C-alpha cells in the first residue's frame, strides 16, 4: 500500500492520539471520557452515542480499549478493540486477580478449548486480523502462564 502525494496532501493534521478504557455501552460525558475529550474540544455526546452504538453487542461493563485520533479541526475518529487477553482469561477462569507469584503458584487451570475460544474472539480485533489462530493461541498461553493459570489439554 503505497502512499501517494495526494494522500499526504489531503491528510488531516492530527492534534492528539488518546487511549481510553471504557465500559461497553456505558460511555458518558463524565470521567474518564469527559476530561480526556473535553481538553481537545471534541464533541463528547457524538463520541458517547457512536461508542455505545458500536459496543451494544458486548455485555455491559466489559472494558473496551479505545484509540481515538483527534484532529486539529475538532473532528475525531476512533477504533474500538476487544478487551485484553488477561480480562478474558480471568473471566474464563472465574478469578478476580492473577497469581502474585506467577511460575511458582498456580491459581487455576483452563483447557485448550478456552484458549481457542479467546483466540477466535481476539482475531476479530483490527490489529490481530493478520495473525493465525495458532499464533494467537501461543500468545494467550504465554499470558496465562504469566498470570499463574495452567493450560491443560482437558479439564477433568
Image (cartoon, helix red, strand yellow):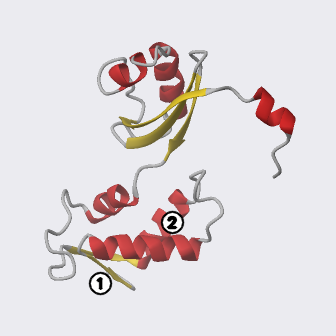
Q: For mark 1, does the 10 Å Cα neighbourhood hold few (<14), some (14 to 19), or many (20 or more) residues?
A: few
Quarter of the figure with residue 120: bottom right
Q: Is residue 36 left or right of residue 156?
A: right
Q: What residue lies at 64% left-to-right and 26% top-to-bottom?
A: 13
Q: Is residue 71 left or right of residue 149?
A: right
In this rendering, is residue 148 above or below 91?
below
* Horizontal and vertical percent position of residue 65: 43, 43
Q: Quadrant of the C terminus?
A: bottom left
> Distance from label 2 to label 1 (Cα)?
22 Å
In this rendering, is residue 155 above or below 87?
below
* Horizontal and vertical percent position of residue 147: 26, 69
Q: What residue lies at 45% left-to-right and 19% top-to-bottom?
A: 40
Q: Secondary structure at mark 1?
A: loop
Q: Earlier in the sequence, mark 2 or mark 1?
A: 2
Q: What residue lies at 30% left-to-right and 76% top-to-bottom?
A: 145
* Horizontal and vertical percent position of residue 104: 16, 82
Q: Nearer the viewer, mark 2 or mark 1?
A: 2
Determine which residue is flagged by label 1. 156
Quarter of the figure with residue 123: bottom right
Amino acid at each position: 500500500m503505497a502512499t501517494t502525494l495526494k494522500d499526504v496532501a489531503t491528510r488531516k493534521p492530527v492534534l492528539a492520539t488518546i487511549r481510553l478504557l471504557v465500559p461497553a455501552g456505558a460511555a458518558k460525558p463524565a470521567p474518564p471520557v469527559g476530561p480526556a475529550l473535553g481538553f481537545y474540544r471534541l464533541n463528547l455526546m457524538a463520541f458517547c452515542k457512536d461508542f455505545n452504538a458500536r459496543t451494544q453487542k458486548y455485555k455491559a461493563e466489559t472494558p473496551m480499549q479505545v484509540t481515538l485520533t483527534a484532529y486539529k479541526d475538532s473532528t475525531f475518529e476512533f477504533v474500538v478493540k476487544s478487551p485484553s487477553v488477561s480480562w478474558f482469561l480471568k473471566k474464563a477462569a472465574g478469578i478476580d486477580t492473577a497469581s502474585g507469584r506467577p511460575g511458582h503458584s498456580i491459581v487455576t487451570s483452563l483447557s485448550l478449548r478456552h484458549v481457542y475460544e479467546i483466540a477466535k474472539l481476539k482475531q476479530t480485533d483490527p490489529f490481530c486480523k493478520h495473525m493465525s489462530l495458532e499464533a494467537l493461541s501461543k500468545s494467550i498461553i504465554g499470558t496465562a502462564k504469566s498470570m499463574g493459570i495452567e493450560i491443560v489439554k482437558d479439564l477433568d
